[in-house]
Structure formats: structure tokens, C-alpha cells
Image (spheres, rainbow, N blue to C red):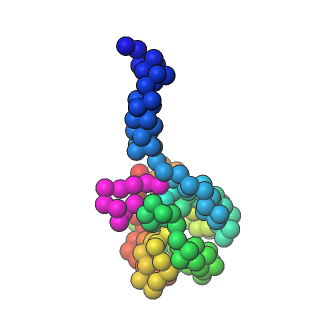
Amino acid sequence: TNIIALLRTDGTTVHWWKRMQEQFSPLRQPHPHFGPLTYMRMPDEARSYWEGRLSFGPSGTEIEVFVDGGESGPSDSQLVCFKEITRRFPELWPQFEERFASFQLEWIRRPASAAYSELYTMTSMSIPRALAADMEWEVSFDSQQDREHLYTIEMRGWTAIGEVRVDG
């Protein structure tokens, strides 16, 4: 029997096929602020997150956002958190520059050829589940000096922790 004939005549086969597609297709949902989001389900549900793209005003670029959370989607507290990160971003930039300066000397091994704001372009950020003094989140950048790597700065609350992490 040919599969097309089965799909056309057997309602249970069509139902089974649709269930399989739903089970293995990522969940998608529009969000009024974060835009179209795709749910990234992890085996450990606590590590699941939503992925999207939006225009980030302070950097003037489109970035990816990784919003921690379950199937119900981003919470109001995450939107509050994102808005506070956005508001504080200019105050956070000096910490990023400090990390880039030490990274520049250790890894690039030459002085920066331009302002760090010209050399590093924000590409993504994670949004924690809630605004808190000890919330953990990350912000990542591309570099004009090396486009094959991603440069990530980990944050705890409003403080950059550790050194620049190089991925890629």
C-alpha cells in the first residue's frame, strides 16, 4: 500500500502523523515585546528557554534573546527584567569595556585599534526568570577583530563576573 493513499483514506494515520509533527516540531508563539519566539525544550526542564530576535535600543542592533522558562512563555517579571537591563545598559558598558581591555591584552596581544564600542557588537543576551540582586545572565558580542568567535560576559545581578569567554 502506498503511503499517500493511506494518508488520504485513513483518518487515524493522518491523526498519528499530525501528533508526530506536533511532538517533534518546536513550539512557537508570538510575544508582544520579544516578537516571534521558538521554545527550546531541554531534557532538564529547568534549562528550557525561548529564543527570539529583537531590536535592542541601547546597542542599535538586532540581537538574539534567550528567555529562560517553560512552555507557558516569558513571564511579566521577565519583561520587567529585560526593561531594567535595557535601562541600565549604558551604566553596564564600562564593565564590559574593562573585560574587553584585559581580554585584548591577553588574547589579541595588541592594543585596541578603536574604541571597544566600535570593535565589539552585541549579538545576544539571556533573560533570567526574574529581576533579582543575584540573577545570572549573559551578554554576547561579535568582534571586528575576529569574526569567527563569540565573546560572552557572564553577569550576576549588575556585576560582570569572570573573564570574557570565547566560543567558536
Q: Residue at x 45, y 29 (%)?
A: 11
Q: Residue at x 61, y 61 (%)?
A: 31
User: On the rendered structure, is 80 left or right of 3?
Assistant: right
Compared to residue 105, the image places residue 91 above or below, namely below
For the residue pair 58 and 55, the one nearer the viewer reads as 55
Residue 41 appears in the picture as rendered: yes
User: On the rendered structure, is 120 left or right of 8?
Assistant: right
Is residue 141 rendered magenta in the image?
A: no
* Range of residues picked out in magenta: 39-49
For the residue pair 137 and 35, the one nearer the viewer reads as 35
Residue 105 appears in the picture as rendered: no
Compared to residue 100, the image places residue 7 above or below, namely above
Q: Quadrant of residue 137?
A: bottom left
Q: Residue at x 52, y 71 (%)?
A: 75
Is residue 44 rendered magenta in the image?
A: yes
Compared to residue 91, the image places residue 28 above or below, namely above
Q: Position of residue 28 (x, y in %)?
A: 53, 51
Q: Position of residue 71 (x, y in %)?
A: 45, 60
User: On the rendered structure, is 139 left or right of 58?
Assistant: left
Q: Please, which residue is most extreme toward the top here?
A: 1
Q: Please, which residue is most extreme toward the left here?
A: 44
Q: Position of residue 6 (x, y in %)?
A: 42, 21
Compared to residue 34, the image places residue 134 above or below, namely below
Q: How many numbered badges does the structure rendering display?
A: 0
Q: Residue at x 39, y 35 (%)?
A: 16
Q: Position of residue 1 (x, y in %)?
A: 37, 13
